[in-house]
Amino acid sequence: MSVDSTAFTQAMSRVPGPVTVATTVDPAGEHWGFTGSSFSSLSLNPPLVLICLDKKASTHEAFTTADRFLINVLALEQSDVAMRFARSGVDRFNAGDMVPCEFGLPGLKDAAARVACSMHAVLDGGDHSILVGRAEATYADGERVPLVYRDRAFARPVADVQMAGVH
Ligand SMILES: Cc1cc2nc3c(=O)[nH]c(=O)nc-3n(C[C@H](O)[C@H](O)[C@H](O)COP(=O)(O)O)c2cc1C
């Protein structure tokens, strides 16, 4: 037995996720990027992260053949960047807010965090590919509030809850 796709996406939309923009540069120097909320930490030793990319996406070939990619974790006030990097058929880089960051990859100077990765593995994940990156350089801005995606809308994280004794 298997759930139908509406029930599945309804349930999954309740799962809060980060809002990231993944970027890479192909051998011809062309910039590629997409908005992804499927970003997650995977392993501490070695330091691995993952993000899932639709096999039908215009960016799929560039990312699955890339040696490196950069994850920009968006801050609360960057939902416009998330919308632009999710839009089809536009030049997502024309706003000029992406500047060379770690390894020269296009990034947001004022992101909540950045994780620059070498490609560790590309795995099959149904209609998506799972890009597993090994973190080679990181940046974190403790002052910026990260943007959250849930119920098909952007949101702010809830206020801190004390978690004494939990590691
Ligand atoms: C908040 C948000 C999160 C998204 N997360 C993902 C994701 O994790 N993986 C993915 O493949 N597409 C994701 N998308 C869709 C892509 O950003 C993009 O719209 C899609 O790949 C179509 O782009 P294309 O025109 O390059 O084919 C997300 C879109 C939004 C608005």
Image (spheres, rainbow, N blue to C red):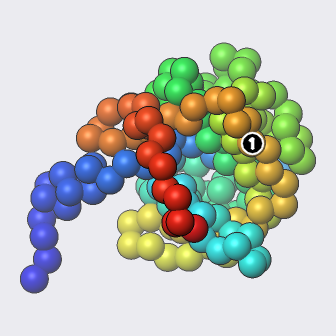
Where residue 132 appears, as percent x and y from the top left, is 64, 69
- When the figure is inspected, residue 46 is found, relative to residue 131, above or below; the finding is below
Residue lying furthest top:
95
> Amino acid under label 1?
Ala
Where residue 53 appears, as percent x and y from the top left, is 50, 57
- When the figure is inspected, residue 122 is found, relative to residue 32, above or below; the finding is below
Q: Is residue 157 left or right of residue 25?
A: left
At x 56%, y 76%, the residue is 123
- When the figure is inspected, residue 27 is found, relative to residue 65, above or below; the finding is above
Q: Quadrant of residue 136?
A: bottom right
User: What crowding class fits label 1: few (fewer than 14 Cα within 10 Å), some (14-19), or many (20 or more)?
Assistant: few
Kindly tell me whether residue 111 is visible in this rendering.
no
Q: Provide the residue designation for mark 1.
A: 140
131 or 58: nearer the eye?
Answer: 131
Q: Quadrant of residue 150?
A: top left
Where residue 138 appears, as percent x and y from the top left, is 80, 51
83 or 90: nearer the eye?
Answer: 83
At x 10%, y 83%, the residue is 1
Where residue 142 appears, as percent x and y from the top left, is 70, 36
- Secondary structure under tag 1 reads strand
| Mark 1 vs ligand 1: CB below 8 Å | no
Residue lying furthest front:
164
Q: Is residue 62 left or right of residue 85?
A: right
Kindly tell me whether residue 66 is visible in this rendering.
yes
71 or 123: nearer the eye?
Answer: 71
Residue lying furthest bottom:
1
At x 67%, y 48%, the residue is 71
Quarter occupied by the C terminus = bottom right
Q: Is residue 135 left or right of residue 153?
A: right
Q: Is residue 10 left or right of residue 55?
A: left
